[in-house]
């Protein structure tokens, strides 16, 4: 009889024995496989549940962070977005002046920040400038000393600016002006009289607590005028006649004057071609009265 020299302790040999045993007992092998699969499924279930649980947890955490982050930024807007620093009036003016120089622009209008004399002095080299409108800030006689150096300046409007007789004499040197609007001046009739030196002045709008009915004679001497608007000046019937004598007068606006009903009747009868506003409206006697739409 041959002896079996196989070492039972050798794993390789043990596998051969197991395979032989399984081949001899196929039912047992199938049962063991089924049992192993079942155990594998049972072992995998907790792992799948744990993965799903982690995913849901992460999702909840992300939503929570986003929500509370949003609430925090809403209650603390400055904590993330830095506060915008508003440029100073001087910086704004410098930017505007740079654009005017670069583009050779013809109009300068200030209406959204305060301007002063020192700023306006910086426009002396803007030779292309035709229109100067200052609706915000305060300009005095000192701020307009360089205006006569602007050869093309045609229109000047200075609100809230107490221009005196000195400033009026300066404006009189601007030979190309055709429009002057000074609704807050501090000039006298002498200052207005200096405007006769402007050869083509066509529109004058002015107010000053120092002006009385006598200014109408000085205005009547500016023969080139087409339009006159006097604000809070006590113009009388005689003053109205002086204004009506302007040879080219087309438009006359008087606010808070002392002209009486007979004075207005006289004007409408003798000068029906003049467009008249009394306190910003047409008078009842005006044969050309009509509604002005905004």
Image: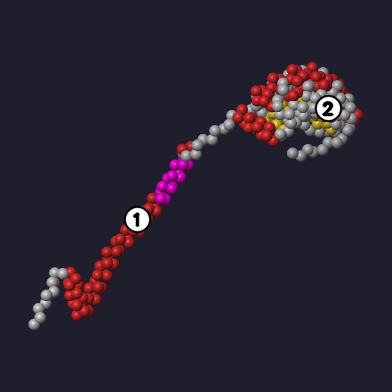
Check disc 2: other Cα within 10 Å, few if <14, some if 14-19, many if 20+: some
Tell me, yes or no, whether the highlighted magenta stretch contains residue 275.
Answer: no
Residue 185 shows in this picture: yes
The residue at the point 82 percent across, 38 percent down is: 290
Which span is picked out in magenta?
Answer: 62-75
63 or 270, nearer to the observer:
63
Mark 2, residue position: 200
13 or 52, nearer to the observer:
13
The residue at the point 78 percent across, 38 percent down is: 292
Tell me, yes or no, whether the highlighted magenta stretch contains residue 65.
Answer: yes
| Residue 8 occupies quadrant | bottom left
Residue 196: where, in percent of width, then height?
83, 21
Residue 155: where, in percent of width, then height?
76, 29
Residue 109: where, in percent of width, then height?
69, 32
Q: Examine the rendered structure and indicate whether residue 59 appears above or below residue 26.
A: above
Mark 1, residue position: 54
Instruction: Mark 2 vs mark 1: give the one in front.
Output: 2
Residue 278: give its label: none
| Residue 148 occupies quadrant | top right
The residue at the point 50 percent across, 37 percent down is: 82
Mark 2–mark 1 distance (CA, rounded to whole Å) = 87 Å
């Amino acid at each position: 009889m041959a002896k079996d020299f196989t070492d039972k302790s050798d794993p390789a040999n043990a596998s051969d024995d197991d395979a032989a045993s399984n081949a001899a007992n196929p039912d047992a092998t199938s049962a063991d496989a089924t049992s192993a699969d079942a155990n594998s499924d049972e072992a995998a279930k907790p792992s799948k549940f744990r993965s799903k649980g982690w995913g849901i947890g992460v999702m909840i955490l992300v939503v929570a962070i986003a929500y509370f982050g949003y609430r925090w930024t809403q209650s603390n807007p400055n904590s993330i977005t830095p506060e915008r620093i508003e440029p100073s009036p001087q910086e704004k003016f410098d930017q505007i002046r740079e654009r005017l120089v670069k583009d050779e622009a013809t109009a300068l209008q200030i209406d959204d920040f305060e301007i002063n004399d020192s700023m306006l002095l910086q426009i002396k080299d803007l030779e292309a400038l035709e229109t100067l409108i200052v609706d915000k800030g305060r300009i005095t006689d000192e701020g307009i000393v360089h205006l006569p150096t602007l050869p093309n300046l045609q229109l000047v409007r200075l609100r809230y600016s107490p221009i005196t007789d000195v400033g009026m004499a300066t404006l009189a040197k601007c030979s190309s002006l055709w429009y002057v609007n000074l609704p807050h001046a501090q000039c006298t009739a002498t200052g207005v009289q200096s405007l006769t030196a402007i050869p083509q002045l066509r529109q004058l709008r002015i107010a000053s607590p120092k002006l009385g009915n006598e200014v109408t004679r000085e205005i009547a001497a500016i023969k080139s005028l087409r339009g006159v608007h006097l604000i809070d000046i006590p113009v009388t019937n005689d003053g109205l006649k002086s204004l009506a004598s302007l040879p080219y007068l087309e438009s006359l606006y008087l606010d808070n004057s002392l002209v009486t009903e007979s004075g207005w009747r006289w004007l409408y009868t003798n000068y029906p071609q003049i467009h008249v506003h009394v306190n910003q409206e047409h008078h009842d006697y005006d044969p050309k009265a009509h509604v002005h739409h905004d």
